[in-house]
Amino acid sequence: MRGLKGKVAVVVGGGRGIGRAIAEQLADYGCSVVVGSRTLSEVENTALGIRNAGGSAHGLSIDVQDRSSVSNFADEAFKLYGRADILVYCAGINQRLSAEEYPEETWSKVIDINLTGAYRTCQEFGQRMIAQGGGGSIVTITSMMSHVVTPKQSAYSASKGALMQYTKLLAVEWAKSNIRVNAVSPGYIETEMTKNAIAQPGFRNAVLEKTPMERFGAAAEIAQAVCFLASPEASFITGAILPVDGGFLAGHPAIIPS
């Protein structure tokens, strides 16, 4: 991807799955990468893999539920490379339960990580990116659940729908600082987070029937979309929500059974 070489990218939620694929792809395109997650061993492993491949990367701990942790993480990232050109927010959790049984403590945790964590992280980095001048790019990872409904995902659907709107809000407000803010909405991607659902034949078949490309996506395909939106090749794109879903939204914007 042209224009990414020499940039400094921060990937929050980069210890595994989609986040790790994003960190690795940004590094492949020449970015220096700071990888953050609550599980330090995972991001250190991601960073080690990037360094072993000839790139520059550091893994740092961050708890997106804790404002001081987010602030300290941002300070450490800036100390390492002196600036941040790209921020990717990929932290997220899910819990599948029927709406009438959904515990408030679970609701609060999912909302706090998926949505409020994005608010904390984007705000801390946004303040620093505005102060550093020169603009930048922020990419959040939303979901098909930002657009459609799957039963038993009360908090996840609410958090991802709100994250989509928050992404658009930041794009409008920070355009004056030349900071572009976009999102990628992954379709059904085979990751650690989705493996249990995909293993259920009824769910798997229903998804494949409603996906025109008749397959699940790979984390690397999400990473390529993120790299495009983060790069100068997307210089006139902001406030966009890019589905990477094998045609799911275009072909069958329908409810998927649990």
Image (cartoon, rainbow, N blue to C red):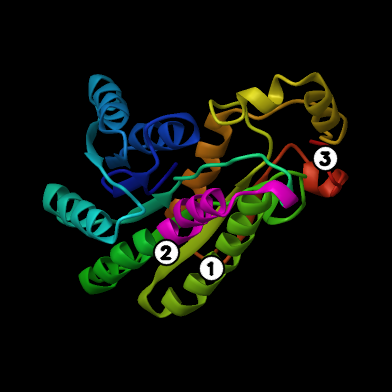
Residue type highlighted by circle 1: Tyr
Label 1 close to label 3 by CB (< 8 Å): no
Q: Nearer the viewer, residue 106 or 114?
A: 106
**In which quadrant of the rendered image does the C terminus lie?**
top right
Callout 3: SS: loop
Can you give x and y, in whole percent of width and height, for residue 110 in the image? 52, 50
Residue linked to disc 3: 256
The stretch of residues the image draws in magenta is 100-118
Foreground mark, 1 or 3, reads 3
Distance of label 1 from label 2 (alpha carbons): 8 Å
Q: Earlier in the sequence, mark 1 or mark 3?
A: 1
Label 1 close to label 2 by CB (< 8 Å): yes
**At 57% across and 41% down in the image, what residue appears?**
94
**At 81% across and 35% down in the image, what residue appears?**
211
Q: Earlier in the sequence, mark 2 or mark 3?
A: 2
Structural crowding at the residue carrying mark 2, measured as other residues with C-alpha within 10 Å and reported as few (<14), some (14–19) or many (≥20): some
Q: Earlier in the sequence, mark 1 or mark 2?
A: 2
Q: Is residue 116 magenta?
A: yes
For residue 166, the mark is 1
Residue linked to disc 2: 119
Residue 120 seen in this snapshot: yes
Can you give x and y, in whole percent of width and height, for residue 221 in the image? 58, 33
Q: Nearer the viewer, residue 94 or 102?
A: 102
Q: Is residue 243 magenta?
A: no
Can you give x and y, in whole percent of width and height, for residue 118 in the image? 43, 58
Magenta-drawn stretch, dominant element (helix, strand or loop): helix
Residue type highlighted by circle 3: Ile
